[in-house]
Image (cartoon, helix red, strand yellow):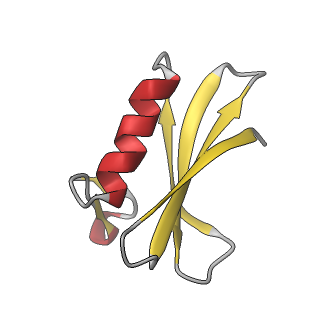
Amino acid sequence: MGKHLSTFYKDDQSEYCEIHIDFKEELLYIKYYKENSSTWFHKEEFPNKSHRYVEDAAENWALGIKKIDPQYDGTLL
């Protein structure tokens, strides 16, 4: 379990994502959540990427630029 760094919400607040860091593995990752859910539906890892890169990915998802296709169980489009 990593340390929570920041949270990004979609405009309608229906979904959100959290950026975490695993210090042991030296890995940043994003967990994606649906409205009123305490369990994430997708986890995306970013090995060898900067915190700024991961924040950009989270922000792009929150703005609707980056999509996650539910048909493919978490595969990014």
Residue sitting nearer the eye, 1 or 14: 14
* Residue 65 in picture, x, y percent from top left: 21, 54
Q: Nearer the viewer, residue 63 or 24?
A: 63
Expressed as whole percent of the image width and height from the top left, the position of residue 24 reads: 78, 21
Seen in the image, is 75 located left or right of residue 13?
left
Location of residue 10 (image quadrant):
bottom left
Q: Residue at x 50, y 65 (%)?
A: 16
Residue at 46% across / 76% down in the picture? 13
Which x, y percent locates residue 74?
39, 59
Outermost residue to the bottom:
36
Nearest the eye: 19 or 45? 19
Q: Considering only vertical position in the picture, is 69 above or below 75?
A: below
Residue lying furthest top in this view?
Answer: 48
Compared with residue 66, is residue 57 higher up or lower down, i.e. above or below? above
Query: Furthest-front residue in view?
Result: 11
Which quarter shows the N terminus?
top right
Report the residue at 45% width, 37% height from top.
55
Q: How many marks?
A: 0
Task: Return the residue nearer the eye: 26 or 53.
Answer: 53
User: Which residue is at a point 45% across and 26% down the rendered structure image?
Assistant: 52
**Residue 60 in picture, x, y percent from top left:** 30, 48
